[in-house]
Image: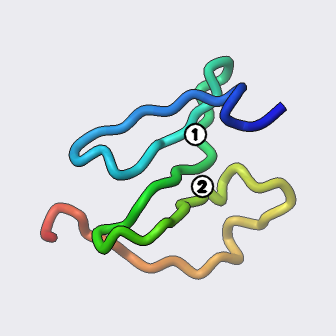
Amino acid sequence: MTFESVMRFYTFNKHRIRHFFCPDCGAAPFGMGKDGKGREMAAINIRCLEGLDIDSVKRKFFDGLRL
């Protein structure tokens, strides 16, 4: 069984990234696609990683409104 067989995905805007989610619980653990230069990439929702202390992760503020 692969994640593609159990997960669902949606896209929006330019449809470059497939945002995967669990159809049963709605959790959205990761996305996969291509960046603006066409390179393969993945984005991981670290809140879905077991055993990770979220307070130990260094964060970088991102203001998407003012891109």
Mark 1 touching mark 2, by CB under 8 A? yes
Front-lying residue, 32 or 39: 39
Query: What residue sits 70% from the left and 27% below the top?
Result: 5
The amino acid type of the residue labelled 1 equals Ala
Q: Is residue 63 left or right of residue 42?
A: left
- In the picture of the structure, the residue carrying the numbered disc 1 is 28
Furthest-front residue in view?
Answer: 38
Q: Position of residue 33 (x, y in %)?
A: 45, 55
In the picture of the structure, the residue carrying the numbered disc 2 is: 45
Element marked by disc 2 = loop
- At 55% from the left and 39% from the top, the residue drawn is 20
User: Is 36 left, or right, of 41 in this rendering?
Assistant: left
| Amino acid bearing label 2 | Asn
Residue 37, horizontal then vertical, whole percent: 30, 74
**Disc 1/disc 2 C-alpha distance (Å):** 7 Å
Residue 47 in the image, given as x and y percentages of width and height: 66, 54
Q: Position of residue 65 (x, y in %)?
A: 17, 61
Screen quadrant of the N terminus: top right
